[in-house]
Amino acid sequence: MSTTAAPPEQTTGPGRPAAIPRGLAALIGLLAVAAALGVGHLVALLAPGSSPFFAVGDTVIRFSPQWLTEFAKTTFGTADKPILLGSMAVVIAIVAAVAGLLSRRSVRPGLTLVVVLGVVGLVVVIFAPTFGPLSVLAPIASIVAGVGSFLWLHRLASRAAVARTGGPEVSRRNVLIGTAAVGAGAVVAGGGGVLLAPSIDDARARVTARLAAATLTETAPAIPAGAAFVENGTPPFVTSNAEFYRVDTALSLPLQSEQAWSLRIGGMVDRPLALDFDDIMSRPLVERTITMTCVSNVVGGPYISTADFVGVELRDVLMEAGIRPGADQVLSTSLDGWTAGSPTDVIMEPGRGALIAVGMNGEALPAEHGFPVRLIVPGLYGFLSATKWLTDIELTTFDAAQGYWLQRGWGKFAPIKTQSRIDFPKGLSTQPAGRLTVAGIAWSQPTGISRVEVRMDGGEWQEAELAEEVNTRTWRMWRTDFDLEPGSHTVQTRATDRDGVTQTEMRADPIPDGASGWPATIFTVS
């Protein structure tokens, strides 16, 4: 009686395919998705902003509920973006591993998940604010790379599984080579997307040189020696570019050279303007020391910094364009599609000092602070006044258009509130008994600070010594002394602006239009 060998159908029993080992199956899913993301990031060089991974992250930021956005800022501070990207990577890795595990015997379940991930990336890129004709290339390339890698590795692993059950011999070495090749390809593609990304270092160097050679029609006065009490714990008066706070929605920085940059000014104007960087530099340049404040700053928070900015008067440019009656909003747009709406009457207020800025602390704007050009409107929180990577200005109305954060329920008009902060002593610190100098900052741009009062343990208010004022658009340092006995102490402070408005004790959350309340610090004297 003769027997016939079973055909190589990759089975371990009647009609049952051989199973790929669990670890290898999960690895196949991970490598296929990694290849998809790496290739997508590389091809995204053709259309900045189209990397599927970052596009998904940007979408998460755009559609996150307000409470979640504020929780991330409050809890993680400036680490919120790395944490978001890391969390996304973990979730995607889990999905990829599950895709592999579901495909131990059949390619279909995992392949479906890989395709779904790719389609999600394609959809979010298509609906991104920066979508252009070339933007589809990266997500399509990502889908092709993911599907191709998954099919190839699954085929190799399936044949190896059959070989272990008596089927045709397939070298395990082929499987190892295949997985190594896909893994290396993913790393090379993703790394290439990072290393080959356009650099603005040369562009910034050119702009810094032009600024150094430029003749300014207005220079910022030198900062007086008595403008800060650094020896008592306050920050330096001017914040270095590296230390200047950063709060924005950009996961990947919009990178554009000054040579490629342009600005459109249109909408409700008599004479629409189209400006390039040379046009900006040919106008009268002014330098101003300005303190910027983020609306997300909690009472006593860190999101406030001061710098010397160079730029042109926004008011002059808008007057040249000719603002039509009824245009109550200046809607500015970033290269990444972010928008902010500033009240027209505030920007056009004589002496307000709003700038189309090109320089910061003696050099070109850093990439993370808006290179090549940004807006700065003193006296308004940043979400209404500080568009980075500026590319468009539209004169319109608040009824016709809403900026990014106004759409999410934030304030329509958000003048900076009179506030103060205690910088020393630090909360929960231990200080020696005797005389203690308490120091900090206060701000009320553009009105200026006239008085700061401090009290210890709920006692009488004591007027603090104010540092020399630089201008009313900046913060002001303060300090005062207390003789303290050992034990726990609580210090509070309140500021009064030049209009006589005193910082309110009433607590308010940062959203929708800025935090309020008296800051308090608890510390111990031993």
Image (cartoon, helix red, strand yellow):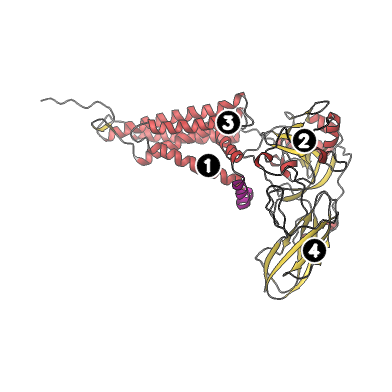
- The amino acid beneath tag 4 is Glu
* In the image, residue 426 lies in the stretch drawn in magenta: no
In three-dimensional space, the C-alpha distance between marks 2 and 1, rounded to whole angstroms, equals: 35 Å
Foreground mark, 2 or 1, reads 2
Q: Which residue is identified by label 2?
A: 330
Where is residue 41? Give x, y as percent.
56, 33
Total labels drawn: 4
Instruction: Please identify, in this view, whether the residue under mark 2 or under mark 3 is nearer the observer.
Output: 2
Pointer 1 or 4: first along the chain: 1
CB atoms at circles 2 and 3 under 8 Å apart? no
Q: Are marks 3 and 4 in contact (CB under 8 Å)?
A: no
Q: CA distance from mark 1 to mark 4?
A: 46 Å
Location of residue 311 in the rendering, given as x and y in whole percent from the top left corner = 81, 38
Is disc 3 placed on a helix, strand or loop? helix
Q: Earlier in the sequence, mark 1 or mark 3?
A: 1
- Magenta region, residue range: 66-78
Given contact means CB atoms under 8 Å apart, are the residues at marks 1 and 4 in contact?
no
Residue labelled with disc 3: 125
Quadrant placement of the N terminus: top left
Identity, as a three-letter code, of the amino acid under mark 3: Val
Q: Closer to the N terminus: mark 2 or mark 4?
A: 2
Which residue is under mark 1? 88
Mark seen at residue 453: 4
